Every structure is written in C-alpha cells, then in structure tokens.
DNA sequence: ATTTCTGGTTACCTTTTGGTTACTGGTATT
DNA sequence: AATACCAGTAACCAAAAGGTAACCAGAAAT
C-alpha cells in the first residue's frame, strides 16, 4: 500500500484532486480555456449544453482552488474574463493522459452505455 | 481546442474515464488491490469506513469495465478473490500522478475545507 | 418606448450517489 | 441449539449534484 493513498476519502490526495476536477463539466471547461483569456459568454457558446448556473458554479470553484483567474470589468453590459493560472495549466497534461487512457482502455465498453 | 476533448460530457473521453475512476472510493479500492489478489473481507478490513453495499457496488462496476477480475469459489462460507486486470494496473501510475498533483497544488487550500 | 447586450442570481425540481440497517445460506465450532 | 464465518442483498433514507425557467442591471441601439 502506497503511503500517498490513505484509505479514507477525506485524507486521500486522489480524492482531493477529484473533488476539483471531478465535476461533470470541469475538465471540459479547463480544456476550453486552455492558454487563452476567454469571456463567460464565449465559453457558453463553445459549451452550449451547460447551463448558466452550472457554468457559473464550476468557474467559481475553479477560481476558489486557484485554477482560474477571474477578471471582472465594471462596465455595462458586464464583461468578465477567465484564464488559467499556472496550477490550472499544469492540469492539462494530466487531463490528456486521462483522455488517452480512456480512449485506449474503455472506449468500446462504455460507449454503448453512454449511447 | 484539442480534438480529444469534445464539449459535451457524453462524448468527452475524460468524462468517460472519470465515470470509471470518479467514484468516492474507486481510486482507493484500485490502489488497495494493487498487485495482489485480495478477498472481499480483507478489502473491507483495510478500508473500514466503506459500507458493504458500496464496496460491492464499486467492485461490480470496476469488474464491468474490465479493471478487476472477480473469482468466486463455490464454498461455504463463500470466498471471492479480486485482482486487477492489465487495464486496471495501467491506471495506477495515473492515480499517483493525480495524487502528486493534488499534493503540490491544492493541499493547503482544500485541507481546511475537508477538515 | 422597447429591445439587446452580458454575466450572472434565485427558487424550485429531479437524478445520482452514498449510507444504514437488517437479513441470507450452509458448514463448522461451541 | 446457538453462533460464527463470508460475501454479499434488499429496503429505505439523506445529501449532493445537476438542470430549468424566470429574473436582474443599466447603457446603447432601433
């Protein structure tokens, strides 16, 4: 048993990481932001099936954990720009590894189930 | 935008991977099995705070997606042995990367919240 | 005067996830 | 005769996550 894992979710570092990137939309959002600075509306346009409420919520959490910057311009109509912090950017390679793993190991089995 | 990510959870390979390893206990279970063959009761003993029902369920899903073998001996009292498939073993390094990422990037922030 | 633009918020509802407790079966031990 | 052993199941509950629809502000354009 590797000491990095502790047999209780509250103390498991993987579980902690999951609590950050594990939301239904979080990996997609992180990947969509990527290296650019992007406005809220643009994100919604790229990810049309996410709702306002959820996109707001996910971005808030990502900001809270230091993965995205949020810059609000006091204008009317409002303008808010999002971008990744260094911590956020450092997640991208990991997300790609997860994608690759999924593509090579479970694509067939799960695709039927997902429809 | 990398083509490996598709802006809809149903088609996103990361989301698919998450659906497999994203359960509250799945990373811990995978890591506890590791390279050995282990019985149900031993797993429960190592991970005491998981309930029978949830452990059964997680193992079933992991088996369904080809990450663990389940060998049932027709005896009384029952005996069932679990071990990782190659696909399951191939996940371990990824889980460790997630743990390392969490430890270096978010440990401080989130530990307060987790208690 | 009304609509549009933007980045949300709010109230409410449904689905998913995880948790609790009690129960099972056949053999061996007390 | 009762109990422990093991690997679960079944019925029921609670909490969390996610989704829907309506609403807001205040300036600019029609």
Image (spheres, coloured by chain):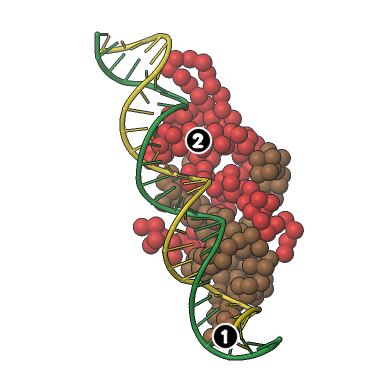
Chain colours: A brown, B red, C yellow, D green
At horizontal 65% and vertical 40% (from top left) the residue drawn is A113
Work out whether residue B9 can be spotted: yes
The image quadrant where one finds the C terminus of chain A is top right
Dot 2 alpha-carbon crowd within 10 angstroms: few under 14, some 14 to 19, many 20 or more: few
Q: x%, y% of residue A22?
A: 54, 54
B35 or B110, which lies in front?
B110
Q: Is residue A69 above or below residue B39?
A: below
- Dot 1: few (<14), some (14–19), or many (≥20) neighbours within 10 Å? few
Number of the front mark, 2 or 1:
1
As drawn, B18 above or below A38: above
Q: Chain of mark 1?
A: A
Any mark on residue A56, and which?
Answer: none
Q: Chain of mark 2?
A: B
Point out the residue furthest to the right here: B3
User: Disc 2 to disc 1, how far (Cα)?
Assistant: 51 Å
Q: Position of residue D23 (x, y in %)?
A: 49, 73
Secondary structure at numbered mark 1: loop
Q: Is residue B50 above or below residue A94?
A: above
Identity of the residue drawn at 68% across and 66% down: A46
Q: How many discs appear?
A: 2
Between D13 and B34, the residue placed more toward the observer is D13
Asked which quadrant contains residue C26, the reply is top left
- Residue A76 marker: 1
Q: Label 2: which residue? A: B57
Residue B9 in picture, x, y percent from top left? 64, 53
Residue A71 percent across, percent down from the top left: 55, 79
- Identify the residue at horizontal 54%, vertical 48% (top origin): B22
Q: Is residue B84 visible?
A: no
Q: Is residue A113 left or right of residue A8?
A: right
């Amino acid at each position: 048993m590797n000491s990095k894992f502790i047999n209780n979710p509250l103390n498991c570092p993987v579980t902690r990481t999951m609590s950050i990137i594990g939301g239904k939309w979080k990996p997609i959002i992180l990947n969509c932001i990527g290296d650019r600075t992007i406005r809220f509306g643009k994100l919604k346009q790229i990810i049309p099936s996410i709702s306002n409420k959820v996109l707001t919520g996910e971005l808030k959490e990502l900001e809270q954990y230091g993965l995205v910057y949020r810059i609000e311009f006091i204008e009317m109509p409002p303008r808010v720009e999002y971008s990744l912090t260094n911590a956020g950017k450092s997640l991208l390679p990991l997300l790609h590894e997860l994608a690759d793993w999924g593509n090579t190991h479970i694509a067939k089995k799960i695709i039927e189930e997902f429809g």
